[in-house]
Image (spheres, helix red, strand yellow):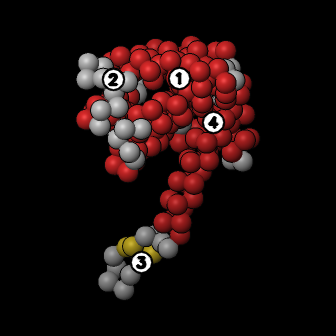
Amino acid sequence: MLSTVDGSFMSSPEAPALRADARRNRARILESGAAVFAERGASASTEEVAARAGVAIGTVFRHFPTKKDLLQAIIKDLLERLTDEVNALASEGDPATALFTFFGRMVREAAEKKTVADLLAADMGAGIQVAGPVQTLQEAIGTLLTGARHAGAVREDVRLDEVLALLTATCQGALSAGWDPDLRRRTLAIVFDGLRP
């Protein structure tokens, strides 16, 4: 703190830079954590995350006191990014294709790399609290479904819970078996045919 002429105090000029630095560290930790846990499973250590992020282990613990806190933050970050992607498709994409675009992208990503979400479901899911971000993502996918229905690209009787069940099952299948591009394309064609009028 610096003293002013009238005796009051103001923050030192370095404080905002430290906050920006802390935000950068947090973002690096989340990105590195997602990569480490995806590669090595939920049993990977926070030390491995710190090393990948290029920060001290104390920096990781300052932001995330436990590994569970770190995993929860990674999942929340992932869900928020997916929601942003869905919202962008809903506002800027073609309503007739936006739902299919998102669905296909999710299945491709599941086949190409293990996700932290899958690791949590298998190893630690019961203790992770991300209900709010999950609900927000589901609502955004519901917006895509409504747009697709109105555009005549999806049958009127298709419900959101059915789309979510299909998306979850297809992503899990692609993830577990590492589907190649041809199998993904053929499987998605069957799923999409079932959704279309």
Residue 100 in the image, given as x and y percentages of width and height: 45, 32
Tell me which label, 4 or 1, sits earlier in the chain.
4
Confirm or deny contact between disc 3 and disc 1 (CB under 8 A).
Answer: no
Q: How far apart are marks 3 and 1 (CA)?
A: 65 Å
**Sequence-wise first label, 2 or 4:** 4
Is residue 197 at least partly visible in the picture? Answer: yes
Can residue 120 be seen here?
A: no
* Label ID, residue 188: 1
Q: Where is residue 56 shown, x and y percent of the image?
A: 69, 45
Asked whether the beta carbons under mark 2 and mark 4 sit within 8 Å of each other, the answer is no
Mark number for residue 197?
A: 2
How packed mark 1 is, by other alpha carbons closer than 10 Å (few <14, some 14-19, many 20 or more), is some
Q: Report the residue marked by disc 3.
A: 3
- How far apart, in angstroms, are the residues tagged by discs 2 and 4? 42 Å
Query: Which tag, 2 or 1, sits closer to the chain's start?
Result: 1
Q: Position of residue 103 (x, y in %)?
A: 48, 30
